[in-house]
Amino acid sequence: MNLLDMTIHVIAPIWGSMTREAMNMDAVVNIRAGVVIMVAGANLEFVPLKISDGTPTAHQIARAAGCKPPADAVVMRVLDNGEMDLLRPDQELEIAGGERFVAFLADHISLLRVDGERYEWPGGAITGAALRRLAGVPDNCVLYLQRVDRADEEIQATTLIDLDKPGIEGFISVKRMWKLNVHGVVVEFTTATVVVRDALVKARFDPSKPWQIFLKVVGEQKAEVTLDTVVDLSRPGIEKLRLMPRAVDNGEAPAPRRTFSLLEEDVAYLNRVGLVWETVVELERRWLIVRNYPLPAGFTVATSDIALEIPPDYPQAQIYGFYAHPPLALANGRAIPNTQLTGTINGKPFVGWSRYRPGQPWDPDADNVITQFALIEAALAKEAGE
């Protein structure tokens, strides 16, 4: 008999009878007085059951619960500490009401362990949901079947587990964790929702600074969020929180230079995301410089000045790669490829990154500073290992 047939054989007759009788209180016992106990079948979902005898036997409880024939049922009493006490059919019990019992048809008892604790279970099959209830595994934990020769198997609520395999089955529960990439720092949470402010604090970013914060979801445009935004980490595609320093004018810093003009959409983008930028001409080379651009975790510095050389006939001519000052280096010491270009702006050395879009030639009708910064973000993330 296979596992599914065995499970149907063990459970289906029980639930047919319990649905007809145990769930219908008048059909089980038609009396004016008695005590109410809680009885569960194979799924460990307890329902109230009224019995007339204050000192019933396990056989009487099985019969009242609708187990047919009651002599083939296994009856266990659930103790206050959560353990189950296997009862003999003729064993008399003193009950006052409210006690919990498990009763259903089974021809043997199986042994299993959850987090090192030993449990007994009637029959050779149990569902993941019943196993959780048996061992008291909370909803915020993941339940795994331990394996020696392969990866542990996650047990879902509907998983049917064959307890007749050789050896005592071993299960472990692990607290469920949700991860979020906060500007290159991966932090973990034990709840599926997190407030952006709390995420920044856990990733060791100061939330009092004037950040502009964006939530990136795979397949969607990044959306600006606030410190009070609640992020649902169980939502598919949640990728990361991206931080940008918001421009703050305290009246002391000199006004950014605007030596030449950019496209209107470029200016709107740079201002919208809060970047501090200027345009300068150095030895007839036109540069767009973004000050203190935030870098992903993994570099030896947190921010860098990023420069794009803007050709005179831009956007018909494309922008090639980007330049950074100070020269960027990875904290793990690995060399960054294709960073041999150099440029000097206001006497400061900038190191260029040769980066292109494979198979995607520059399109003057679609590409601009905005798409170039998307390339920059992707290139930096790739080198940082994001």
Image: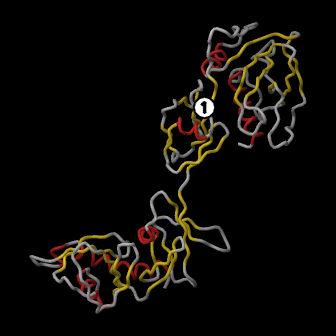
Q: What amino acid is found at the position of numbered circle 1 in the picture?
A: Asp
Q: Position of residue 29 (x, y in %)?
A: 16, 79
Q: Nearer the viewer, residue 119 or 23?
A: 119
The reply, left or right, for residue 257 in relation to residue 16 is: right
- Please determine whether, in this image, residue 62 is positioned above or below residue 382: below
Q: Residues within 10 Å of mark 1 (few under 14, many from 20)?
A: few
- Please determine whether, in this image, residue 268 is positioned above or below residue 209: above
- Furthest toward the left, the residue is 32
Q: Quadrant of residue 203?
A: top right
Q: Nearer the viewer, residue 28 or 312?
A: 28
Q: Quadrant of residue 13?
A: bottom left
Q: Nearer the viewer, residue 233 or 326?
A: 326
Image point (36%, 78%), residue name: 12
Image point (43%, 79%), residue name: 7
Mark yes or no: residue 114 visible: yes
Q: Position of residue 31 (x, y in %)?
A: 11, 78
Mark yes or no: residue 323 visible: no
Q: Position of residue 173 (x, y in %)?
A: 53, 65
Image point (19%, 79%), residue name: 51
Q: Quadrant of residue 96?
A: bottom left
Q: Position of residue 66 (x, y in %)?
A: 26, 81
The reply, left or right, for residue 27 in relation to residue 93 is: left
Quick one: SS at disc 1?
A: loop
Q: How many marks?
A: 1
Which residue is identified by label 1?
A: 206
